[in-house]
Image: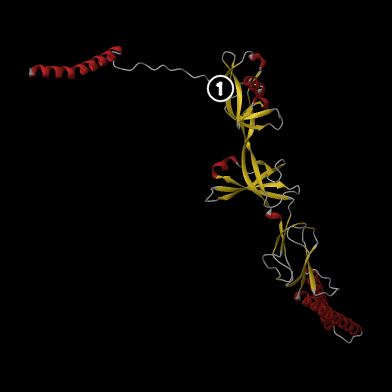
Amino acid sequence: MTLKVVDLSLLIVLIPALIILQACGNVKGDTPDGAPPPAKVIPFADAALFSVDHPEQFPVVAAVEKPTAAELAVTGTVSPDVSRNVPVVSLASGRILAIHTRLGETVQKGQVLMTVRSDDVSGGYSTYKMAVADETLAHAQLERTKDLYEHGAMALNDMQVAQDAEDKAKVAVDTAAEHLRLLGNDPQKMNSTVDIEAPVSGVITDQEVAAGSLVQAYNTPPPFTISDLSTTWIVCDVYENDLASVRIGDTAEIKLNAYPNRAFQGRVNNILPILDPNLRTAKVRIEVRNPGIMRLGMFATATFHGQTKEMHTIIPASAILHMHDHDFVFVPGPENKFRRVEIVSGDVLQDHTDLQEVKSGLAPGQHVVTNALVLDHVLAQ
């Protein structure tokens, strides 16, 4: 009786195990090698490929090559041509009574800039008047000596001494008069002040004095600096890696931030031999004619046009589609289809405004749709 109960319990445990083994055997029987069935890949459609019913309605043209000068765009500032900076030097020391011009004003040659009360001028007039008195006395003595010599009452040597004294007195008068004229005064009109005049025409670009201050003769820095701004410099920073593409004599197109729609022409006249150790840039100097609107310190963009030629791809400007800050062209594809290709466009040619450069994304000889905007409008319908 006890044995039968044990056999029944054993059967209850073995039956589920046999069912699981049977199921596993059925699964393995479907794939003899034990690998899962292969996945079915469904390819997606090419989003850049478009089909049209009548492709002949959209004419195509081949991209061509054109040699253009290498270009490099950098930033810079307007600076004065230091060779055209003229310091205003005061030849007399004294106190400034009045200033007749201000920083930034345009002055003409000979214009009075400031008036100085100077002891140098007073001393110059004193010296001049004493020299005139000595010359008058020497002349009178010479005349008497000549008269006595003619009557045999004076020796020849005495007359020669008198003549020498008058000659020296005349030299002293001429020297004193020239000193006053150099100070800017008239020897015949006594005046204790002196007017400092502009030596050249230009713009006051530096002022170091004020009314009531003292000025020293030949002192540095000078009271004023006048700059001839008819020609200015554009000083640019060019990175070390780009220096090989810039050479002295290269032409450059200048655009000012203040006048973005106006271009100026310049030429590289110097590349400084020292690099900034922090920025790794070198100063490149461009000489530009100033039409009168360039102001010192203005920001500018300089585009260098190198002397070597590069081959660029050229296509009609209408073949480029501008969309979402990107540029695209349509090229013919198989079976009445067109493929949209992204490119990097360049500048519009100055001599042909209907042509535009392509920097990358399209090779010479490839065909593109001449009017990309029309094709894009048809595809959007």
Instruction: Give x and y (percent) for residue 313.
Output: 62, 27
Residue that lies at the very extreme toward the bottom in this rendered image: 153
Residue at the spot of label 1? 48
Question: In front here: 163 or 92?
Answer: 92
Amino acid type at mark 1: Ala
The relative height of residue 55 versus residue 293 in the rendered view (above or below) is: above
| Between 42 and 275, the one nearer to me in the picture | 42
Q: Position of residue 29 (x, y in %)?
A: 28, 12
- Dot 1 falls on a residue whose secondary structure is loop
Q: Dot 1 surroundings within 10 Å: few (below 14), some, or many (20 or more)?
A: few
Residue 255 percent location from the top left of the image: 68, 43
Q: Is residue 176 visible?
A: yes
Image location (x, y in percent) of residue 233:
68, 49
Horizontal side of residue 166 vs 244, given as left or right:
right
Quarter of the image for the C terminus: give it.
top right
The residue under the point 7% across, 17% down is: 1
Q: Quadrant of residue 379?
A: top right
Q: Tell me how the rendering is colored.
A: secondary structure
Quarter of the image for residue 357 reads: top right
Relative placement, left or right, of 204 versus 340 is right
Q: Is residue 148 above or below residue 230?
A: below
Give residue 65's quadrant in the image: top right
**Residue drawn at (57%, 50%), measured in percent from left and top?**
273
39 horizontally vs 351: left or right: left
Count of marks placed on residues:
1
